[in-house]
Image (cartoon, rainbow, N blue to C red):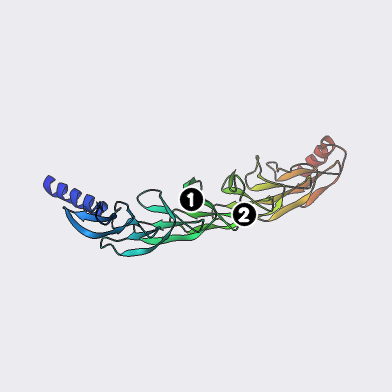
Amino acid sequence: MNKILLALFFALTAVANGQGIEVSYDKSTKKWGYMRNDSMVIAPRFTIARDFTGKFAWAKSKGKWGLINLRGEWVIEPTYQKIEEFDDEYSLVIRKKKFGLVDIRNGVVASPCLFQKRFFFEELNGFGKAAVVVQKKKAGLINSAGKIIVPCLYDADKMPFAEAGGHFYQVKQKKKMGLINWSGKLVIPCQFDEALLSDADTSTVSTKKKNKYGLYATSGDVIAECLYDYPISFDEDGFAAVVLNKKYGLINRKGKLVLPCQYANDDALFTEREKLKK
């Protein structure tokens, strides 16, 4: 049994390493090729050649990088100026100063060279392994397979996607803030100077525009427009004090004024608020 497992291990290792094929330099042609067991299996015709990862390897010809298979055939034509290998699965590729992604496990282009900046993958809550990419000076997200999961619509500043708590990220368009959810959907439009998940009630988002405050539900429904002097948060009974032109009032969860903004201070409002309980 152990001999069978050992044989299987070596077989799998051979496949993972290009079935024992190794890079070889030919002095007479000054080119690189590939050998197996001291026999040349891919003729020396490359200016640079990399080791095989599974069934594919990067090779350079006429100043450009491409991907070859075990027979030395181009599966991705040599069109890239540079390549940077992330891991055993993907490589970053560069063409005409634009960045893309190649799946070196399957020998296919995962993402064409569309992006303006080098990108790196990291774990993002809600999105898994993802990378910020920039296209036409706008930021988006791709997953580790190169699929766009958030379109390039947002300001490409130092932190285009900032965790906002809950299942949300802050984004900006023309320097105005909004929120996207973990599905990449814009739920709070990019219209505000601030858009923050409420501390006391994570089902609402406090918004600020021109020094006035409003409130959204995290579903994207407007509860209160940015009319009020201070941030709004609901109490456990589903009411929120609001201040308009230094006068206090009370709204319910639908944003309706149940007590008009006519009270001089919160004490006066509290007195009227208690009457609603009766």
**x and y percent of residue 3 in the render?**
11, 47
Secondary structure under tag 1 reads: strand
- Compared to residue 115, the image places residue 166 above or below, namely above
Residue 45 tag number: none
Q: Is residue 161 found left or right of 192 in the rendered image?
A: left
**x and y percent of residue 239 in the render?**
73, 45
Q: Residues within 10 Å of mark 2 (few under 14, many from 20)?
A: many
The residue that mark 1 highlights is 130
Q: Nearer the viewer, residue 27 or 2?
A: 27
Residue 231 occupies which quadrant of the picture? top right
Is residue 147 in sight in this rendering? yes
**x and y percent of residue 190 in the render?**
68, 54
Q: Which of 258 and 117 is in front in this view?
A: 117
The residue that mark 2 highlights is 154
Q: Is residue 205 found left or right of 18 in the rendered image?
A: right
Q: Is residue 13 found left or right of 223 in the rendered image?
A: left
